[in-house]
Image (spheres, helix red, strand yellow):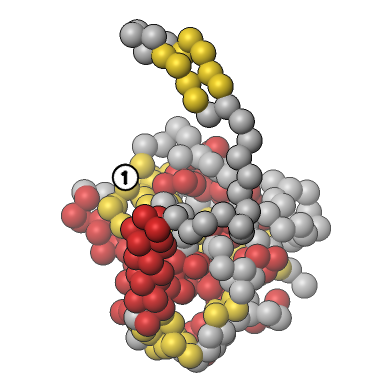
Amino acid sequence: LVLQFNKAGEVVGYDGALEPVTGDLPQDQFVLTNVEQPVAAYLETLAETVIATSEVGLNGVRADVRTRETNLGNLMADAHLAAATSRAAEFGVNEPDVALQNGGGIRNDSIIGPGDITLLDTFDIAPFSNFISVLEDVAVTDFVAAVEHGLAGLPDAAGSFAQWAGMTVTYDATAPAGSRIVDLVLDDGTVVVSGGAIVSSEPVTIATIDFLAAGNDGYDMFETYDFTTLGVSYQQSLADYIAGVGTITASEYSDPVNPADRTRIIPVP
């Protein structure tokens, strides 16, 4: 594409043509030396940088992380809760009660491990420029709406499906979307929903990624809230947490394929 501009910077003409891009084109040596080779070398370094080991395979399969609790979803939500908790004082925000990661942000579409977990694995899992953020004092009705939204797409896979830390929700997937929560309890014992009814008036502070904090992926209940970004990407949050754990154990992070084994996002029998 060739554009012609006048002195005011306005486009006054254009020309162009289709250029074939095939394997027959000669290798561009500048691009090879300055782009391809450095990127390949960097990726090799990431792949060789072991940050932890796992006793279990970490399930980031697209159809799973968008429909149910998985161990990788739990790991990511735990990482975000820990990252936001450790940085809360520095950024002058409340420590979060819960953490949210949408299934659509988990991108490896595979089961990783068991065995060594590398830094490259964390980029495969979390490749976007999403940053950990805190939404303070979210009204309980908006918090419940967010939990409901995370369940609304079931039984179909949806990127908005919510992986949570800091809480347990029991839900009925056969109920109409928007009224699927049966019980919702925070890890500190606060009962938010009981028997389908909201029984708490206490606001909730949520750690999540800025993409969701801004109301994307249908989380428009957050749009009226200001949020604070804490200067760490969701990939770095995951990498830091995994490195700190050292060994991802089967006792804590086995993948709950069987609904009876789920401890955070639990379908009613």
Could you tell me which quadrant the C terminus lies in? Answer: bottom right
Percent across and percent down for residue 213 are 45, 44
The residue carrying pointer 1 sits among few (fewer than 14), some (14 to 19) or many (20 or more) residues within 10 Å by Cα, namely some
State whether residue 203 appears in this view. Answer: no
Instruction: Count all numbered tags in the image, as a single digit.
Output: 1
**Residue at left offset 35%, top offset 62%:** 33
Residue closer to the observer: 156 or 118: 118
Q: Which of 241 and 267 lies nearest the eye of the viewer?
A: 241
Q: Give amino acid for label 1.
A: Thr
Q: Residue at x 47, y 46 (%)?
A: 211
Q: Which residue is mark 1?
A: 228
Q: Is residue 37 left or right of residue 256?
A: left
The percent position of residue 241, horizontal first and vertical second, equals 35, 73
Q: Is residue 94 above or below residue 47?
A: above
Residue 109, above or below 35? below
Say if residue 131 shows up in the picture.
yes
Residue closest to the far left: 90
Measured as percent of width and height from the top left, residue 47 is found at: 41, 78
Closer to the camera, 211 or 83? 211
Is residue 155 found left or right of 246 in the rendered image? right
Task: Write the residue at 61% across / 59% down.
Answer: 23
Q: Position of residue 256 (x, y in %)?
A: 63, 80
Dot 1: what SS? strand
> For this view, does 125 lie left or right of residue 5?
right
